[in-house]
Every structure is written in C-alpha cells, then in structure tokens.
Image (cartoon, rainbow, N blue to C red):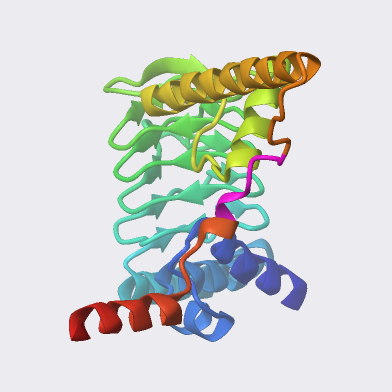
Amino acid sequence: MFQRLKEDITCVFERDPAARNYFEVLTSYPGVHALIFHRMNHWLWRHKMRWLARFLSVFARLITGIEIHPGASIGRRFFIDHGLGVVIGETAEVGADCTLYQGVTLGGTSWEQGKRHPTLADDVVVGAGAKVLGPIHVGSGARIGSNAVVVKDVPDNATMVGIPARVAKIASEPAPPTQADQRRAETARRIGFEAYGATRDMPDPVANAINAILDHVHHTDARLQEMCAALRALGAEVNTNDIPDLEHCAIDDERAASQSTSAKDS
C-alpha cells in the first residue's frame, strides 16, 4: 500500500515541473487526494462494502472536484493534473503511467449494464476537456488532444484531435541517429550550443535552421583545416591552437563590475 502511494506521489515530479517536494504534493494536489481516496474506495467496492465506497467517493468529489467511481480500475503511477471536473465512470479501466488533465471525462454512451466505459492502456495522456466515451480501447502511448471527443478505438501511439476525434499522426519508433545527426551534435558540443526541446517526431523550423547553421559551421571548419594544412605544407607558420570553448570567454562578474566602476570614475 505504502509502496503504491510512494509511486503515485513520485510520478508527480516527472510530469509537473511545478512540484517542489513530497510534503507539497501530498498536501496541495487534489489529483493525489482523489487517487488516495479512490484506492481505498476501490478496495471497499471489491469487498462488497459498496454503499460506504460510494459515500466516501462523494465526499472525495466534494473536496477535490474529481469524481472517480469506486468500481473503476486504475493502474500504477496515475496522475491527474489540476483535476477539476474530471469524471471516471464505473467500468472504466486505466493502465499504468497514464495522465489526465482537468475536465476529462471517461464516460459511457449507454444505460445498459455491463462494460460501458473506455479502457486506457499504459502511458496514455488525455488533454484538458477531452471526452473518451463508450466501451472503446485507447492504445498504449496514445495522446488525446484537448477538447477532443473520442468515440472509436484508438491505435497504439496515435495522436487524436477534433470532434469527433480523428488520428492526426501515429508516432513510430525513432530512427537511429544518422552520421549527419552525430556530426551536428559534435559541432554543437564543441561550440557550446545545446538544443532544448527539439525531438525527432516534432519538426521545428527553428531547429531545422540551427541544424543548417551547424552543418555550415562543420563544413567551414573542415575547409579551414584543409587550408591550414596546405599553408603548412608550403612552409607558412599557422596557428594550430584548437577552437576555444565558449566557457573560456565568460566574463567574470567581479572584474566586469570593477572595470565598469573605473570607467565611470574616469
């Protein structure tokens, strides 16, 4: 039980950069509170204490704004971010490492008994305001866009958007880095540049432009090396020092401040 609770709290740090410490998460995250209540209510539900489970789930909804039916099955490391307005129905099943944002509904489309709510496989993310309706299956690694309405099965690794939701793309396994990618990474490391937030499955025109610049830097450097080698072969004296790292060009704050003061005094 305590191991499961630790996992539920620890996963918050991986998905919410605003989380600062365990005490803050445990005391001020309604998604965590709702999940703790649900773990207890689901145990009561499975042991036939269903009125008490329903009563406590209503109490949890009052204090968190999140409604999770005690009959719903929820996997490990589940995270509800912000949380207000989230509704999870009785026969819903949620796999491990799933994330829901505010206003999400895992609802039904029928008044018939039996399975009537969706099943989410592992590592599914459902964006704010999205509705996933009916006894459908959402594949592993799927992403549901904000305010999308999903009423059909979702393939693995698919991104769904729109009303009704349609497949925007299906992520594939990332290809191994090419020789050009490795060269760019080496050039970027050498000149002190590090790309941030650019991924293979999300093309970025700025990142593409930077890649072109890095290619140009690489070819320019290679030509300069060839020219230096040719000049040395002709007997010329050529500076063979390596290109300095940018960190050596950093300005010392104290020295800069003293120089600024001296300039003002003069």
The dominant secondary structure in magenta is loop
Count the marks: how many?
0
Residue pictured at 36% horizontal, 83% vertical = 258
Residue occupying the point 71% across, 17% down: 231
Is residue 173 in view from this perspective?
A: no
Instruction: Determine the residue positioned at 66% across, 73% down.
Output: 5
Quadrant of the rendered structure where residue 157 is?
Answer: top right
Q: Residue at x 57, y 19 (%)?
A: 220
Q: Position of residue 119 (x, y in %)?
A: 57, 36
- The front one of 72 and 260 is 260
User: Would you say 62 lies left or right of 38 here?
Assistant: left
Q: Quadrant of the C terminus?
A: bottom left
The magenta stretch spans residue 18: no
- Location of the N terminus (image quadrant): bottom right
Task: Give x and y (percent) for residue 148.
Answer: 32, 30
Q: Which portion, as a residue range, is magenta? A: 241-247
Q: Residue furthest front?
A: 235
Res. 12 image quadrant: bottom right
Taking 117 as reference, is 151 above or below it?
above
Q: Picture coordinates of residue 225 (x, y %)?
A: 69, 21
Left/right of residue 199 with respect to residue 183 in the rendered view = left
Q: Is residue 125 left or right of residue 237?
A: left
Q: In this orientation, which residue lies closer to the viewer: 206 or 57?
A: 206
Residue 93 can be seen in this image: yes
**Relative image position of residue 36 (x, y in whole percent):** 56, 73
